[in-house]
Image (cartoon, rainbow, N blue to C red):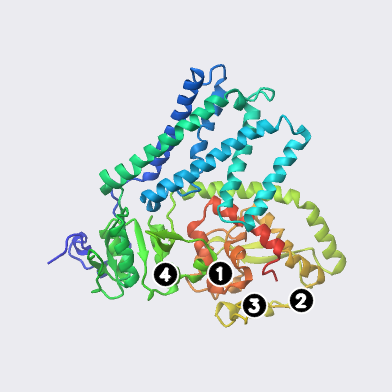
């Protein structure tokens, strides 16, 4: 007797194994749509409505006496209460379904918004007492102090920096929109204050009704995410029990086990849909949006292959930290119903992200190249005066999709140096023959006789890679991405290693920030893949910011 919803019922009687090896398009649920646009539209409309209502109550009109541009700016200022919602993960449905989490994070976001609003008003108050010549240096110095403090303080210090940064942006725009001698912020301070005061309770009540009464109750079937669990072990049972007991916004479609007959013994039993080699057929017969991997029998190549399959098919992937210990050790991880998990989120509109990233790469690389011209000149002169040969070294490297390109660096070795030492070292490292020393660090080449005195300084400070800004301008590289490998390294890569070349290589990367040369080769690959699956502009800027401190500490350079 065939179970309802089994893979066979969707394939005309064929077994799932008959479809393995060929891709069957995933069925789309016509009734499901993302909650994020709905929440975002609600937040923006409520905040703008509260701003308009506050202006009407305080001034008997929507900012009377102001120009159209000034009215538009003042209304946008009314969005300050929602400016930090993303920082406190208030658009993560797997977290905000919890009323306690949702309301507590709303309170934190509103508190930071009030701090931001206060900083804007305080700026104008201080402007009357601080000499104009000290005004900009003061704020620049304060911003630099907060950025430096953020490196050594708690994680939440980041949002504090954002709050003060946004305050500076608001003040700057206000100076461009209105007359400097009559600041529009102070002119309409009562209306702006009333708008912020209205928006806090309205947003709280509106979000509570939308998330907890609509999404998670009345329209639960529309917004509940379909989830597949790969594994039938104790961890899989614990996750299933937590989802069911906490009434989380997921529906467990079934499980996939190493053995076809395994079942999940949770609070509510879930059927086994098949084995790992039948995943494509299982996806064809079920509308799945979330996948959780708990089975420790999954090897690293299998895990990477599964993650690649899930994310390319528009699914979010979750897996236990013990499957990739380096991620748990080095990076912040997510949680699913209170259980620590690593999450790879499928992101829509990748095309737009790639275009924006490329534009930012070009602009920042051009700016960096111009600002570093004195460093170029000093480095070139030092190389030329202390050793024979060219200033630049051009190496053939492997770029996106396995294509070769010419990568530029300052020459740090004697002319005609043999590549055999490095080639032997890299080959042994990739094969796992180079292990950690007694302190837990990966053994590396030290006192290389091929490196010149100036080259040693350039490598220690990573200034030898500065000419790669030219590669960024040419489109061969990005500012952030997996570091490019050399052809003889690429030749001995395993198939799952080569997935790191699916994006443009970068001058800096995630593994350099969190581990650099102190992690094993496979851990480096895993960190690169984590970046590829989770890449975003926010992550790129975080890596660039952390790179500065890594260089100052000269961590792992060789």
Disc 2 or 1, which lies upstream in sequence? Answer: 2
Tell me the residue that label 4 is attached to.
Answer: 303
Disc 3 or 1, which lies upstream in sequence? Answer: 3
**Tally of marks:** 4
Disc 4 or 2, which lies upstream in sequence? Answer: 4
Tell me the residue that label 3 is attached to.
Answer: 423
Circle 3 residues within 10 Å: few <14, some 14–19, many ≥20? some
Camera-near label (4 vs 2) is: 4
Asked if one can make out residue 320 in the rendered structure from this viewpoint, the answer is yes
450, above or below 107, in the image? below
Tell me the residue that label 1 is attached to.
Answer: 524
**Quadrant where the N terminus is found in the figure:** bottom left
Alpha-carbon distance for marks 2 and 3?
14 Å
Alpha-carbon distance for marks 4 and 2?
40 Å
Tell me the residue that label 2 is attached to.
Answer: 450
- Picture coordinates of residue 499 (x, y %)? 49, 65
Disc 4 on helix, strand or loop?
helix
């Amino acid at each position: 007797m065939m179970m309802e919803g089994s893979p066979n019922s969707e394939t005309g009687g064929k077994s799932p194994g008959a479809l393995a090896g060929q891709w069957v398009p995933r069925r789309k649920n016509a009734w499901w749509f993302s909650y994020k646009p709905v929440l975002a539209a609600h937040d923006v409309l409520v905040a703008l409505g509260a701003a308009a209502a506050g202006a009407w109550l305080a001034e008997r009109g929507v900012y009377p006496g102001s120009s159209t541009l000034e009215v538009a700016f003042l209304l946008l200022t009314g969005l300050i209460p929602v400016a930090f919602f993303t920082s406190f993960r208030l658009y993560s449905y797997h977290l905000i379904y919890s009323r306690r989490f949702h309301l507590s994070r709303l309170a934190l976001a509103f508190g930071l918004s009030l701090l931001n609003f206060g900083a804007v008003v305080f700026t104008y108050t201080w402007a009357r007492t601080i000499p104009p010549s000290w005004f900009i240096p003061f704020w620049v110095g304060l911003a630099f102090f907060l950025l430096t403090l953020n490196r050594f303080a708690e994680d939440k210090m980041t949002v504090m920096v954002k709050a003060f940064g946004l305050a500076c942006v608001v003040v700057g725009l206000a100076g461009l929109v209105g007359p400097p001698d009559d600041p529009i912020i102070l002119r309409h301070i009562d209306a702006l204050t009333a708008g912020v005061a209205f928006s806090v309770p309205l947003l709280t009540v509106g979000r509570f009704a939308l998330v907890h009464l609509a999404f998670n109750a009345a329209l639960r079937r529309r917004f509940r995410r379909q989830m597949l669990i790969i594994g039938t072990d104790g961890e899989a049972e614990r996750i299933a029990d937590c989802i069911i007991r906490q009434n989380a916004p997921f529906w467990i479609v079934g499980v996939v086990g190493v053995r076809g007959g395994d079942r999940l013994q949770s609070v509510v039993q879930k059927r086994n849909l098949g084995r790992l080699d039948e995943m494509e057929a299982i996806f064809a017969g079920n509308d799945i949006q979330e996948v959780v991997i708990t089975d420790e029998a999954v090897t690293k190549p299998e895990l990477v292959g599964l993650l690649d399959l899930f994310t390319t098919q528009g699914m979010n992937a979750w897996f236990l930290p013990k499957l990739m210990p380096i991620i748990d050790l080095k990076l912040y991880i997510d949680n699913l119903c209170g259980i620590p998990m690593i999450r790879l989120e499928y992101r829509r509109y990748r095309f737009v992200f790639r275009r924006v990233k490329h534009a930012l790469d070009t602009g920042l690389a051009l700016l960096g190249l111009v600002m570093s011209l004195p460093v170029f000149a000093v480095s070139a002169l030092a190389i030329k005066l202390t050793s024979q040969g060219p200033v630049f070294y051009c190496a053939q490297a492997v770029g996106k999709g396995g294509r070769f390109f010419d990568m530029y660096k300052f020459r740090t070795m004697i002319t005609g140096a043999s590549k055999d030492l490095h080639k032997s070292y890299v080959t042994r490292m990739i094969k796992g023959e180079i292990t950690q020393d007694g302190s837990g660090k990966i053994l590396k080449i030290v006192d290389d006789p091929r490196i010149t005195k100036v080259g040693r300084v350039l490598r220690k400070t990573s200034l030898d890679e500065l000419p790669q800004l030219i590669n960024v301008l040419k489109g061969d590289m990005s500012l952030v991405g997996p570091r490019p490998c050399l052809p003889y390294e690429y030749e001995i890569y395993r198939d799952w290693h080569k997935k790191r070349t699916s994006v443009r290589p970068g001058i800096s990367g995630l593994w350099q920030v969190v581990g650099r040369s102190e992690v094993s080769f496979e851990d480096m690959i895993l960190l690169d893949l984590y970046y590829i699956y989770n890449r975003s502009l926010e992550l790129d800027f975080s890596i660039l910011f952390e790179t500065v401190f890594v260089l100052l500490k000269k961590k792992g350079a060789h």
